[in-house]
Image (cartoon, grey):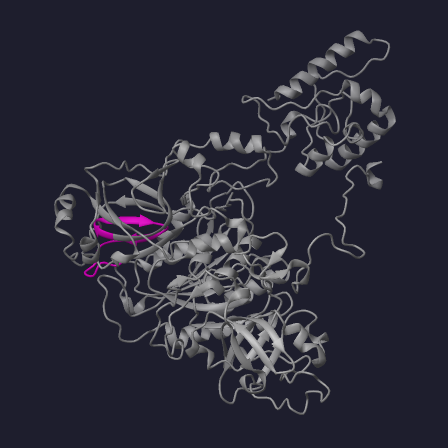
Amino acid sequence: MLSAIAARKAAKSATVAGEDEAAPRKAVTSDIPSVRHPKSSRSSKRKISNARGAEEFRVGAPKRQKPTSGSNSNPQAAGRKGGKEDVPVIVSRDLRESEGDSDSADSGLSTGDDDAEVPVTSLPPPRGRHWSPSAPVADSGSDEEELEANLSSLPNRSPTTFQPSEANTLRLTPDEVSSLGLNAEHGSAVAMALSVGERFCLLGAYTVVVVHGSLEACGALFTPSTVPRSHRVFAPKCSHLPTFECIPASSTPIPSPSPGPPRLQPICQKFSAVVVIQELSLGVDGLERVFGTFNGMFRESQQEKTNGEVVDIGLRGVQMVTRQTRSLQPLTLLPSWNTALSSSEPPPSSSSSSITGVFLVKGPKKTGKSTFAVTLLNKVLSQYTKVAFLECDIGQSEFGPAGMVSLHVLDKPVLGPAFTHPSLPFRAHFIGSTSPRSSPSHYLASVDSLFQTYRTEVQTPGLEPPAGNKISEYIPLVVNTMGWVKGLGASLLESIEEIVHPTHVFEFESSAPFSSRNPIASPSAIQHRFLEPFVSSLAYTAADQRSLSILSYFHAVFLDRRGIGDTGSDFALTTPDLWDTSLPLCARFPFEVDCRTAFERVVLAGSDSDDVVPEQIHTVLNGALVALVACEEGAPDAHLDLASQTPSNSPFSIPYVQGGPPPPPSASTCLGLALIRAISPDKQKMHILTPLPPSSLARCRVLVKGEVELPIWGMLDFREQEEGVLAGFEKHKMPYLQWGKSEGVGVERRRVRRNLMRRGQM
């Protein structure tokens, strides 16, 4: 079927052919020749353009117009002034911007030839971003008009169907809040009554307690228990918002709910579910001041309130989302995801002693792999009391800063983006980079060590108290892999599969449209399912999310739990109680450490780390992020005699050996990260900032410095408002920072020339 633009070009070509008989030109007829090779099409296009001249084509070339709703085209594919007039050429956004810069660039890409040698049926599929969390992004460089058009074409499905009224919404008193096991000092609370099928989506940070019925969100199942169990939910604009939906009560018997406030008893008899929402003030919204890119991520804008996109429900900092927009996007699971999540449930007839499960998630980057891994974790938690999570994605870690492979054990669903739940791991190993490219052997050794720890200390916890109808005799494992799936990355993924021996493999397709496949039956009875890519259309990059996770980690306040990770008896995930953003990192009181007695070894990891000589180690460590590593007694290379190897003329006595290997993963563990804020060579002192509790710091005897650095936002003082002053100093005197224009060769921004042709195009 001809598009509108191709039809106009054909009509114009026929008119020109009738008027100018002296120079006859080929008209577009129904006898369209066969498709030529794309390479020859591009070559002939450039030859004709150069032979006939640019002035003739500038006059005869049609203007670029927006496609109509009835044409099978899009703003990026149809009507491009390149090649022959009847052959639409897909041009990138940068190229289209260069077309509008000058007439010369526009004329260089224009042609006036009406020759038709490629049929319309050979047009590529439409490209563009569809503003749905479920739709893949074919081109990230869409125009604003296209984004608005795709957003308006979304199905009319409101994220919230619950309508607050006096009959289904009740504001609780402080005594009623305390009777539900909540702290009334954290804020007020409201009770909402829902019927089956109703759903609600909230913006902000809040606590959820299900008093009656069953709710489902992000793969997790929420039901009442003997002791009301609260769940913390973080729903900022920089992530997809959880949507709670009331589902029919399960036929499986559940523990009888504890008696709630008397005023809720009549409501529980009329409605299918009753849920209590309380304000949650833990200081996580203060990260907006620390990282200016995420300013306003927990707050509604004035425009959103004016347009009715959010509705007030009587809670401070919590708004109900009524409409999906570019900044308010609820999480919607894909059909292939729901099918795959159903396959992760254990068979009802199987005995708990025979159930085993190792769930591995793999696929390219930007396909929703981490989102599905967390959703799978929540789904498995509805069947088991605890679930282990092995994080192998060192670039986008879910439970901590980047650069570490870690093992976590969870007993509650995860409801929020990665920066809202930085955690102290059960075991971890520091790689020191966002990619294992520079140390693949150390990366695989760390993964193997964590999996052996899971087998020996976590998989079978022993005698665990029963928790309703959940399985407590076995702890399954969810493995989240990295998005590097080509070359060396593919080999590393194969090695990880050989290490963990998964029982379920969930693989994401790298291209769209998604073609559903049946599970692959293998001799080892591995269930292999292919999933549809889930591409986020949020405006934040992976680097921004990684920087926010690092800053959230250093502003978090953890409980001082002694002995965490020493034995396998304590599996509780250590998450921060609150976030302290009252002071920047440059204004906090650090730990003062004597390097001569506190550390036994300093290791540099990553590329080019072997080139650092001992005389310059204090310069490298100044202002660096380091890993605090604890080694076992008698571990190889754990206690080295470095006194004789340290140069006598070194101004700083740091136990460092050039090119030394990192601690072996089998005999060490990474406790967390720290920031070396300052070094005093004269006094042999270090000033260190770390969120780890003091009980864990006593175990640290080794420092490992990798390629991960502190984001620039962590070096700034967000309290300063005076121009030219930063943290009490003038800006030009601040270390590590340079203001204004850079100096030196190669610092200028490169100018890309897109109007130059290759030899094959001439």
Residue 762 vs 210, above or below: the answer is above
Answer yes or no: is residue 367 visible: no
Answer yes or no: is residue 346 visible: yes
In percent of width and height, residue 697 lies at: 47, 78
Residue 227 vs 325, above or below: the answer is below
> How many dots with numbers?
0
Q: Is residue 728 left or right of residue 408?
A: right
Residue 562 vs 535, above or below: the answer is below
Which residue is pictured at 54% across the width and 49% down the height?
293
Quadrant for residue 716, please give it. bottom right
Q: Is residue 130 left or right of residue 194?
A: right
Q: Is residue 225 left or right of residue 408?
A: left
Quadrant for residue 734, please give it. bottom right
Judge whether residue 219 is colored magenta: yes
| 666, 430: nearer the viewer | 430
Judge whether residue 504 is colored magenta: no
Per the rendered image, the range of residues in magenta is 210-229
Q: Quadrant of the N terminus?
A: top right
In percent of width and height, residue 53 lies at: 86, 25
Which residue is pictured at 62% across the width and 91% down the height?
641
Which residue is pictured at 74% across the width and 29% down the height?
82
Q: Quadrant of the C terminus?
A: top right
| 586, 527: nearer the viewer | 586
In percent of width and height, residue 263 lies at: 14, 47
In percent of width and height, residue 527 lies at: 42, 57
Quadrant for residue 286, please give it. bottom left
